Amino acid sequence: MSRRAEVLAEMGIAPVWRLKARPAAPELAPVGWIPLKAAVSGCVKCGLHKTRTQTVFGVGDENADWMLIGEAPGAEEDRLGEPFVGQAGKLLDNMLAAIGLSRRANVYIANVLKCRPPGNRNPTPEEVAQCSPHLLQQIGLIKPKLIVAMGRFAAQTLLETSASIASLRGRVHRYAGVPLIVTYHPAYLLRTLEDKAKTWEDLLFAKKVMSGAAAP
């Protein structure tokens, strides 16, 4: 058993692959947006509550067909309380607009974690274990038709894998019963401009999945 699986077991939380197999488990049944937002805002289940400015719940259309999931809030997200802001957020908005989408109309954006890890370090398995139920609740309420995992950490966490983004792209995976595709994080694209074309390919592939042209 992996260390992460041991941590999850100690906390009484099933590993992600088991949550995917039974997403409608009673303890994860959607509780409604108002109580869920209140639960996230007041969450003290891990140590990140001691260093956050505020929680970053998510933003967008609560009935969206598309759900984008990133890693965790950064400094600007922690300050403003909204995911994917700053230059990375602008790039994401431009990419979405290019395929006729908007975070305000037909997309919902969230992170694996709702609180910023200090120094923008990678989240720990314990932090992911405590925050995953919030994400699953969001998915249960939104009922998206497609999830896009943005960035290495989000993809590896949601899919319970150590595989690279390069090997995960171009295929349809599943998380919590929902088709999922993998692409690069906008912040990474700001540093690696040559991979923008690959992300464009991923978004076009996502549109094909949504239209039924690519089998989920």
Image (cartoon, rainbow, N blue to C red):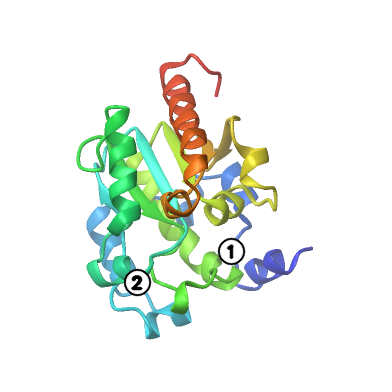
Q: Amino acid at mark 1?
A: Ile
x, y percentage for residue 208?
Answer: 46, 20
Q: Which mark is first along the chain, 1 or 2?
A: 1
x, y percentage for residue 11?
Answer: 60, 72
Q: Which element type, helix, strand or loop, lies under badge 2?
A: helix
Q: Residue furthest bottom?
A: 50
Q: CA distance from mark 2 to mark 1?
A: 29 Å
The quarter of the picture where residue 22 lies is: top right
On the rendered structure, is 5 left or right of 112?
right
On the rendered structure, is 80 left or right of 47?
left
- Front residue of 62/33: it is 62
What residue is at 44 percent from the left and 33 percent from the top?
A: 146
x, y percentage for residue 162?
Answer: 70, 53
x, y percentage for residue 170?
Answer: 59, 30
Q: Which element type, helix, strand or loop, lies under badge 1?
A: loop
- Which residue is denoted by mark 2 in the rendering? 75
Looking at the image, residue 7 lies above or below residue 58:
below
What residue is at 29 percent from the left and 39 percent from the top?
A: 94
Q: Is residue 85 visible?
A: no
Quadrant of the drawing holding the C terminus: top right
Looking at the image, residue 179 lies above or below residue 49:
above
Badge 2 vs badge 1, beta-carbon distance below 8 Å: no
- Front residue of 90/216: it is 90
Q: Amino acid at mark 2?
A: Ala
Q: Residue furthest front?
A: 194
Dot 1: few (<14), some (14–19), or many (≥20) neighbours within 10 Å?
Answer: some
The circle drawn on residue 13 is: 1
Looking at the image, residue 100 lies above or below residue 140:
above
The circle drawn on residue 126 is: none
